[in-house]
Image: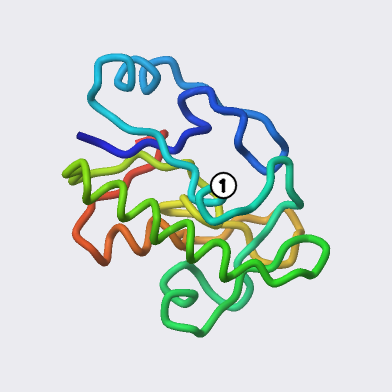
């Protein structure tokens, strides 16, 4: 069983209320081989919502209290992102998932790249909060591009 970012199977749950449908991943869901999660919605954030970026590091730094997640309006949404990551982990462990396919570049789900925290559009090497929490708990994480 795998966890898949809900936006990748067609759920319009991204910050901009769009999806990033990947038909192969959608088929995995249809076959009962995956469950979809959107950590940001699980954490109580609305859709649509202002875009958010990690400021001061990456997802590991957020977990360790050294970085925050701030939305474009300046609101600190770290608590909501953390709550959503914890709920996503709970779902993953409940179904026995050992791996996840998560949306690259997301402050929650990025597995190799996230935005730079300055809303400049620039991507930097780093990992999102949910991806970091999954890896710390033994769940293999890859992006939809892997």
Q: Position of residue 69 (x, y in %)?
A: 62, 68
Q: How many marks?
A: 1
**Looking at this view, is 119 or 65 the one in front?**
65
Q: Is residue 78 left or right of residue 59?
A: right
What sort of colour scheme is used for the picture?
rainbow
Q: Position of residue 118 (x, y in %)?
A: 74, 66
Question: On screen, 114 above or below 144?
Answer: below
**Looking at this view, is 73 or 114 the one in front?**
73
Q: Is residue 126 left or right of residue 72?
A: left
In which quadrant will I find the C terminus?
Answer: top left
Q: Position of residue 119 (x, y in %)?
A: 75, 60
Q: Secondary structure at mark 1?
A: helix
In percent of the image, x 53 and y 32: which residue is there?
Answer: 7
In percent of the image, x 54 and y 61: which residue is there?
Answer: 81
Question: On screen, 109 above or below 5?
Answer: below
Q: Quadrant of residue 34?
A: top left
Question: On screen, 64 above or below 16?
Answer: below
In percent of the image, x 36 and y 17: which residue is there?
Answer: 24
Q: Quadrant of residue 27?
A: top left
In percent of the image, x 49 and y 66: which residue is there?
Answer: 82
Q: Position of residue 1 (x, y in %)?
A: 20, 34
Q: Which residue is mark 1?
A: 41
Badge 1 density bin: few <14, some 14–19, many ≥20, Cα 10 Å? some
């Amino acid at each position: 069983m795998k966890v898949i970012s809900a936006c990748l199977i067609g759920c319009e749950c991204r910050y901009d209320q769009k999806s990033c449908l990947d038909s192969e991943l959608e088929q995995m869901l249809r076959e009962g081989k995956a469950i979809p999660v959107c950590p940001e919605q699980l954490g109580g954030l609305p859709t649509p919502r202002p875009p958010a970026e990690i400021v001061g590091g990456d997802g590991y730094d957020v977990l360790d209290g050294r970085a925050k997640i701030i939305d474009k309006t300046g609101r600190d949404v770290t608590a909501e992102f953390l709550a959503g990551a914890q709920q996503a982990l709970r779902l993953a462990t409940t179904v026995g998932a050992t791996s996840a396919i998560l949306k690259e570049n997301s402050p929650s789900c990025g597995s190799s790249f996230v935005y730079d925290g300055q809303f400049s559009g620039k991507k930097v090497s780093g990992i999102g909060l949910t991806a970091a929490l999954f890896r710390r708990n033994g769940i293999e994480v890859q992006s939809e591009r892997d």
